């Protein structure tokens, strides 16, 4: 009988891919199969995120829950960014945890499994050329890492400390992974990195140095591959060449994530983001002028230290001007050992929460106005989810979630759909013959 594995994944797309990598290694090398309930598992992994403060005691209370109800003899491993950040403190506080595996050490999963109380969290560990075994959670699309770590030093961000310096994965490994995905049924690939359009900055080997735009060109030549998505690009690295390739390459999906963080150039400077409000708006304009159908999503942090009422107003003004299609908005959360942790002039908690809800309300208003204009539009949709109520859902090329009446025959199909009704986060349509 095979051994059973339960994985809980928190946080970003990179963490999801790290979980897929660990599952692949454990399946192929250790004979594990994945299950949905931890009570029956022989191995429980929690892949953690530390980008915002999730009270540490919440992790420990969750671990306590696993420990109480797990099968006798089952192992527990804590992985990901909080593992990198807390290290052996985790085992000190929860001695029943069997191992701690950092976000930069995923390839060592089958090693730590057999060493009781192993703590592998070195952030200078280079796994950019490690050939992971294959596993993906969706048959229709494949997540592919193109770099590890991050070389920026945004003052609010803990990621460079948990994932280490940026190293690009060699092009041949990425292309091979994409080809393999296509040959096993995926029509879409999703390229992942903390800073994808900085690709090529540093390789560990001596392979040819190419940049992100060139990588996109080469991947788009793969026969049978229909769609390429990626996250996250950095506004600072959105040069004209990149935007032009994005606009004219039919395989690149027309949705761009542009993490603004703040609409005030002063706050952007305090955050060390490397661009001004004017540069950001100029890039949006260039993108929209070359690619009118593009949808734009963003990340915004409110209540960064010293953010004044005027700074916040500037963020709202950028939102009114750009009319983002999707926002991920957060209240600033001080993170240990980041530069901003020592900033004084903190914004009052309550005021921060108020700003967050003002921003979210504005976004919803803008989105409703925008969505109302989509009725009757036709989109090309790649279907990937079967809903309970006889609907099948997928995404348009520009990343709008659309559902139609239908059954599993539609899964994995790409069809033209006309929009017949509008919701805030999902549109309904009918397939055109
Ligand atoms: N490399 C990614 C960022 C990863 S973190 C990028 O540039 O898009 C994802 C998002 O979490 C960030 O864009 C930011 O909006 C938010 N975030 C990061 N640190 C934060 C903090 N200390 N407090 C609040 N939000 C934060
Ligand atoms: Fe964090 Fe900035 Fe890198 S947000 S992940 S340090 S680009």
Image (cartoon, rainbow, N blue to C red):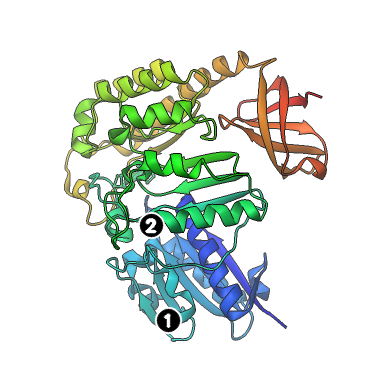
Ligand 1 within 8 Å of the CB at mark 2: no
Q: Give the image location of residue 315, x and y in percent.
A: 33, 24
Q: Are marks 2 and 1 in contact (CB under 8 Å)?
A: no
Left or right, residue 141 beside residue 90: right
Q: Position of residue 73 (x, y in %)?
A: 59, 86
**Quadrant where the image shows the N terminus:** bottom right
Q: CA distance from mark 2 to mark 1?
A: 39 Å
Quadrant of ligand 1 in image: top left
Name the quarter where the C terminus is drawn: top right
Reading the chain from its start, which is encountered first: label 2 or label 1?
1
> In the rendered image of this protein, does residue 212 appear above or below residue 290?
below
Residue at point 40%, 21% (across, down): 319
Q: Quadrant of residue 32?
A: bottom right
Residue 344 in view? yes
Placement of 164 over or under 187, stated as above or below: below
On screen, residue 267 versus residue 105, left or right, reads left
Q: Residues within 10 Å of mark 1 (few under 14, many from 20)?
A: few
Residue marked by disc 2:
170
Task: Say what secondary structure mark 2 lies in.
Answer: loop
For residue 419, which numbered disc appears in the image? none
Question: Where on the picture, by quarter, is residue 237?
Answer: top left
Along the line of sight, which residue is nearer the eye, 67 or 396?
396
Residue 117 lies left or right of residue 206; in this view the side is right
Q: Of the residues tagged 2 and 1, which is closer to the observer? A: 2
Would the CB of label 1 be found within 8 Å of ligand 1? no
Q: Nearer the viewer, residue 281 or 230?
A: 230
Q: Look at the image and tell me whether residue 10 can be seen.
A: no
Name the residue: 23% across, 38% down: 271
List x then y, in percent, for residue 226: 60, 39
Which mark identifies residue 95? 1
């Amino acid at each position: 009988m095979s051994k059973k594995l339960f994985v809980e994944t928190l946080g970003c797309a990179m963490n999801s891919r790290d979980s897929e990598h660990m599952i692949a290694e454990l399946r192929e090398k250790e004979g594990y199969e994945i299950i949905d309930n931890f009570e029956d598992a022989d191995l429980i992994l929690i892949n953690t995120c530390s980008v915002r403060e999730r009270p540490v005691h919440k992790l420990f209370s969750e671990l306590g829950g696993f420990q109480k109800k797990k099968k006798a003899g089952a192992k527990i491993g804590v992985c990901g960014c909080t593992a990198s950040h807390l290290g052996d403190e985790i085992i000190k506080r929860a001695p029943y945890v069997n191992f701690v595996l950092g976000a930069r050490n995923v390839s060592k999963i089958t090693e730590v499994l057999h060493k009781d109380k192993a703590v592998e969290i070195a952030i200078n560990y280079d796994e950019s050329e490690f050939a992971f075994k294959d596993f993906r959670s969706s048959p229709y699309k494949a997540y592919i890492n193109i770099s590890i770590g991050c070389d920026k030093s945004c003052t609010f961000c803990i990621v460079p400390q948990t994932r280490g310096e940026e190293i690009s994965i060699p092009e041949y490994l990425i292309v091979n992974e994409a080809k393999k995905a296509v040959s096993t049924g995926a029509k879409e690939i999703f390229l992942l990195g903390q800073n994808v359009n900085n690709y090529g900055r540093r390789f560990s080997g001596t392979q040819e140095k190419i940049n992100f735009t060139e990588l996109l060109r080469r991947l788009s030549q793969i026969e049978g591959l229909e769609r390429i998505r990626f996250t996250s690009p950095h506004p600072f690295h959105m040069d004209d060449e990149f935007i032009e390739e994005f606009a004219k390459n039919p395989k690149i999906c027309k949705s761009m994530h542009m993490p603004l963080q703040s609409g005030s150039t002063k706050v952007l400077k305090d955050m060390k983001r490397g661009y001004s409000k004017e540069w950001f708006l100029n890039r949006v304009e260039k993108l929209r002028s070359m690619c009118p159908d593009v949808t734009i999503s963003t990340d915004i942090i409110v209540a960064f230290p010293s953010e004044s009422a005027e700074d916040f107003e500037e963020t709202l003004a950028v939102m009114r001007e750009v009319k983002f299609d999707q926002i991920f908005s957060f209240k600033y959360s001080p993170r240990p050992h980041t530069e901003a942790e020592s900033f004084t002039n903190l914004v009052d908690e309550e005021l921060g929460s108020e700003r967050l809800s003002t921003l979210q309300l504005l976004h919803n208003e803008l989105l409703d106005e925008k969505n109302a204009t989509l009725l009757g539009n036709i989109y090309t949709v790649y279907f990937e989810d079967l809903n309970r109520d006889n609907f099948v859902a997928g995404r348009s090329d520009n990343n709008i979630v659309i559902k139609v009446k239908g059954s599993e025959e539609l899964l994995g199909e790409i069809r033209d759909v006309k929009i017949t009704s509008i919701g805030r986060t999902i549109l309904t349509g009918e397939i055109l013959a």
